[in-house]
Amino acid sequence: MKEIIADMRIKRPMNRLLQGDVGSGKTFVAMCAMLLAVDSGCQAALMAPTQILAEQHYLTFTKWLAPLGLKVGLATAGRREEIQDARIIIGTHALLYDKVEFDDLGLVVIDEQHKFGVAQRGKLIQRGIMPDVLVMTATPIPRTLTLTLYGDLDVSILDELPAGRGKIISGVRVKPKVSEMTRFLTEQLEEGRQVYLVYPLVEESESVKATSVIEAHPKWQKRFKHFEVELLHGKMPPEEKDAAMTRFRDGKSEVLVATTVIEVGVDVPNANVMVIFNAERFGLAQLHQLRGRIGRGEHKSYCILETDGKNPEALEKLNILAGTLDGFKIAEEDLRIRGPGEVLGKRQSGVGELRFVEYLADTSLIREAREVAEEVLREDPGLEKHPYLKDWLMAQAKVEPS
């Protein structure tokens, strides 16, 4: 917060990345920043990638800010709540369009920033006059690469979890017996807890050998006859998704059979068990995000990674996840296994050309390189004293020297 407050109080617009593990409290930090903007007479907006996440933030902010008498607005494709006179507006891509009017937009917060394109982020920022910008991500990026890839952003890292969280036990299970799993889940449900059952597919596929939520849902309804078993996936109409999530959040259903639509932002403290089926089909970062949906309350939590065990590399990946809850360690292991090009995708496709022998061991060298680069740009912004570097950069960007 000190870093963000200092940024917001200077004349230059803030451009900061808040990186924190799942459940570390990024939303609370964002709310504090938004209150600072409101206190100075501006509006603040938070854009989330999905309707479920936007509504989750809306409910959370409304609960937190009700004692202050602050109106919080919601703008999604399917809903408009309290937009008139709201000083804080939360929404999805709907915030990008003129149907939502802003009055001096002073702070833009973009949650799960990697799920938005550069143009989308820019369009929301342009709806204010040089607003402060805070982008947030729970997708762990190794610290070494954060320094390199986000050289244009100031970076704040939340590396602790709030107090009062229950312990999470993770385990890999190769072809477990359904009867044994059902017995364990029933015990948890009878103690009053709730359960996530996550599948990689919405519907059956001829090309992919994996179970889908649509075929799994009725089977779990039969196994849990005395409990409400809810279905949730991305192809459902928005109002049905909203209703299903609301029932689960309110405890009216005990089991949620879902796809990765629950990957980000869903906060149900009473849900303490997650079974991820065909876990080998998910990436490490995505598995870590999914697991972040449990362990948000005081109860001991369990994440079961179900797999067929046929792929040794996949088993190694799953055992890494089972062995630690630290998203940064997981990201570094992911980097070690797959290499930077695979981990970072198209956005950072040039990372493979960086001349560091060992990404994970060369943190100090990367930090020093960044400091030198900043010093060069500060003293010679046009690179007139560094013609070789200027020519190389122009060639990379395919721009003719002026």
Image: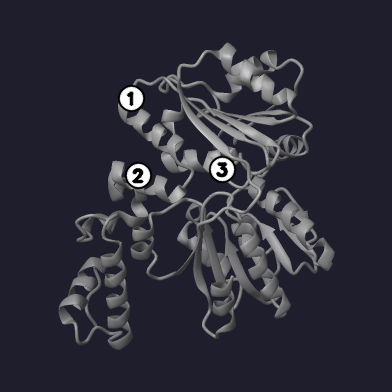
Would you say 171 lies left or right of 106 here?
Answer: left
Task: Report the residue marked by disc 1.
Answer: 311
Rounded to the nearest angstrom, the CA distance separating label 3 from label 1 is 25 Å
Query: Label 3 neighbourhood size at 10 Å, few (<14), some (14-19), many (20+)?
Result: many
Whether label 3 touches label 1, CB < 8 Å: no
Q: In the image shown, does 352 or 160 lie closer to the viewer?
A: 160
Q: Where is residue 304 in the image (x, y as percent from the top left)?
A: 52, 28
Whether label 3 touches label 2, CB < 8 Å: no
**Residue 38 visible here:** yes
Q: Where is residue 367 in the image (x, y as percent from the top left)?
A: 31, 69
Residue occupying image coordinates x 28% and y 46%: 339
Task: Report the residue marked by disc 2.
Answer: 333
Location of residue 325 with respect to 318 vertically, above or below: below
Q: In the image shown, does 247 or 391 lie closer to the viewer?
A: 247
Q: What residue type is labelled 1?
A: Asn
Residue occupying image coordinates x 64% and y 34%: 272
Would you say 87 lies left or right of 105 here?
Answer: right
Q: In the image shown, does 113 or 36 lie closer to the viewer?
A: 36
Sequence-wise first label, 1 or 2: 1
Q: In which quarter of the image is residue 324?
A: top left
Task: Mark 1 vs mark 2: give the one in front.
Answer: 2
Q: Where is residue 222 in the image (x, y as percent from the top left)?
A: 69, 13
Q: Which amino acid does label 2 sit on?
A: Glu
